[in-house]
Amino acid sequence: MREAGHAVRVVRADPRMVKLTHAEDELLIATLLERDRQMRTGTGYDVHRLEPGDGVRLCGVTIPCDLRLVGHSDADVALHAAVDAILGALGEGDIGSHFPPSDPQWRGADSALFLRHAMALVQARGGVLDHLDLTIIAERPRIAPHREVMRARLAELAERPLTSISVKATTTEGLGFTGRGEGIAVQALATLSLPRADFGS
Ligand code: MG
């Protein structure tokens, strides 16, 4: 180029500019792009009280029984823990800071709305929810028969494949408030992949 009288300038390469010739080249690009992303995890925990009622709402599914969860919104303790885990991975505060319980507009709200909000934040940051793992701690109602339905509903709400969602349940062997059936607790762990640039490194 210089011989032809043109100026030559050095520019920073973009991994996406690698020429695709062989199958291995594709792997190289995938590796380089992966380097631009970072994994983040967040945890969530929530508890709601049980009282006599006509069904318990968990993961957007109503389990028919003689109990219900009490709360300002629909009290879906599983979705609340999931939202907090996602917000935690994003470093975006907690569910209460996004949807203050003092705000009357969230009274009786469908908690699916909170999850969609959290997922919109993930998308806005160019992130992907790689995995969401919930542990429901309850003596009653029995979770096992509804576990797969809840998992499917959660996958649907998060718009993620079923393989990215896990719902587990346990009891506390009759111990503590969950064991006495006074409430249900849920633990959540969210794993996101986010653009590395998002963290300034
Ligand atoms: Mg809650």
Image (cartoon, rainbow, N blue to C red):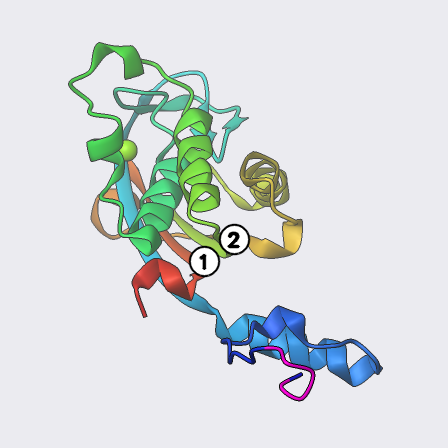
Going by the numbered disc 2, the residue's amino acid type is Val
Instruction: Kindly check if marks 2 and 1 are in contact, taking CB atoms under 8 A apart as contact.
Output: yes
- Look at the picture and state if 167 lies above or below 199: above
Instruction: Look at mark 2 in the image and give the residue it sits on.
Output: 128
Residue 182 visible to the viewer = no
| Principal secondary structure, stretch drawn in magenta | loop
Instruction: Look at mark 1 in the image and give the residue it sits on.
Output: 192
- Left or right: 152 with respect to 140? right
In the picture, the quarter occupied by the C terminus is bottom left
Residue 17, percent from left and from top: 65, 71
**What residue sits 15% from the left and 18% below the top?**
102
Looking at the rendering, the stretch of residues picked out in magenta corresponds to 2-6
Residue at the extreme top of the image, as rendered: 104
In the picture, the quarter occupied by the N terminus is bottom right
Residue 112, percent from left and from top: 46, 28
Split into quadrants, the picture shows ligand 1 in the one at top left
Q: In this view of the protein, which residue sits in the foreground, 90 or 82?
A: 90
Residue 15 visible to the viewer = yes
